[in-house]
Amino acid sequence: MISAKQICFGYKKEDQVLNGLSLDLEHPGIYGLLGKNGTGKTTLLKLLAGSLFPDQGQVYIDSISTQERHISSLQQVYYLAERTESPDWPARRLGNIYGKLYPNFDQTQYLHYLNVFEVNPDIGNKSLSMGQQKKVEISFALATQVPYLFMDEPTNGLDILSKKQFRKLISQYTSEQQILIISTHQFREIDRIIDRLLIMDNKDLVLNQSLEVIGEQFLFSDAPSADEQLLYQDEGILGKYGLYTNPSKRISTLDIELLFTAICERPGLLKNIQNYENNF
């Protein structure tokens, strides 16, 4: 489990990016991390991975503080940055050398992911397009097979077909014991593959819940019944389509964009689910 306890962080003393954020990651699955620009998503991922240390509070990886810099603990985490600087090596050599840093790295799987992405593993990194370089980085990240994998805007630079291949790889090769967080602004690129939703706002984490529980608590509909109360309606949406209470537990299609907008504009909505624990 990864646990963050009342962490505060600022790149400048007078400008806190995170303020008293707490988070427990204990449910295996694929998490979608959402937030407006500047809310601290990237900073949070770096703190959880041990790349940054909080100004206040602590982050623990399997009960060990990241500030202790235990090799065995840090090897359980891999953070894929939105932009990385890799040496001008062919992808195959990159795996042979850097893969040794991760005990469960699988070179065979790594080459398989590259094949799915149609990337030649024997071409130097600088000779690849930006999209191809991103595919190498994604393939390496998946091949580490770490328990905690964090991806920051992983589909930036990928074309439509490659994004589809990315979702397929995530769905097929993520371990049932693994915690994967995908930070993105592209709601519709992850809504079919995530199990849980993390939303950041006002320098804090305001939602950490499974899609199953969200579906039980909220109804996304244009045809509510008399006992379903309207909570939020986007002014740009025609008709009566909106977010409603769901007392009868009706099934509806989750609209992540609508939910995200509603939570950011009306934080009081969270009282409907903040104390509701998912038993699955």
Image (cartoon, grey):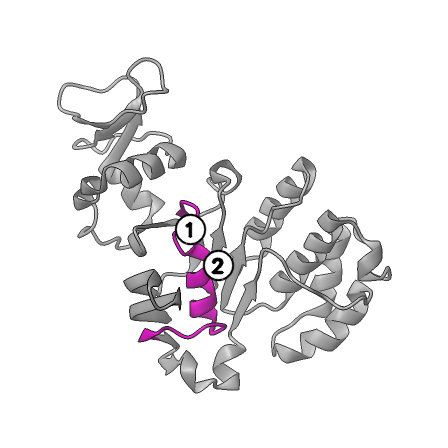
Say which of 153 and 265 sits in front.
265
Question: Horizontally, is 159 left or right of 249 in the view?
Answer: right
Q: Is residue 126 visible?
A: yes
Please state the total of marks drawn on the protein image: 2
Q: Secondary structure at mark 1?
A: loop
Say which of 255 and 235 sits in front.
235
Magenta stretch encompasses residue 38? yes
- Quadrant containing the N terminus is bottom left
Q: Earlier in the sequence, mark 1 or mark 2?
A: 1
192 versus 207 height, above or below: above
The picture places residue 5, in percent across and down from the top left corner, at: 28, 71
Determine the residue located farthest toward the front in the rendered image. Answer: 14
- Quadrant containing the C terminus is bottom left
In the image, what residue occupies the spot 74% across and 58% down? 112
Magenta stretch encompasses residue 30? no
Q: Amino acid at mark 2?
A: Leu
Q: Nearer the viewer, mark 1 or mark 2?
A: 1
Q: Quadrant of residue 4?
A: bottom left
Q: Which mark is residue 261?
A: none
Q: Quadrant of residue 140?
A: bottom right
In the image, what residue occupies the spot 35% across and 65% down? 26
From the image, tell me which residue sits under label 1: 38
Question: Horizontally, is 259 left or right of 114 in the view?
Answer: left
Q: Is residue 120 visible?
A: no
Alpha-carbon span between mark 1 and mark 2: 22 Å
The picture places residue 256, in percent across and down from the top left corner, at: 39, 37
From the image, tell me which residue sits under label 2: 180
Question: Horizontally, is 242 left or right of 171 in the view?
Answer: left
Q: From which residue to which does the magenta span run?
A: 33-58
In the image, what residue occupies the spot 49% across and 53% down? 182
Q: Secondary structure at mark 2?
A: strand
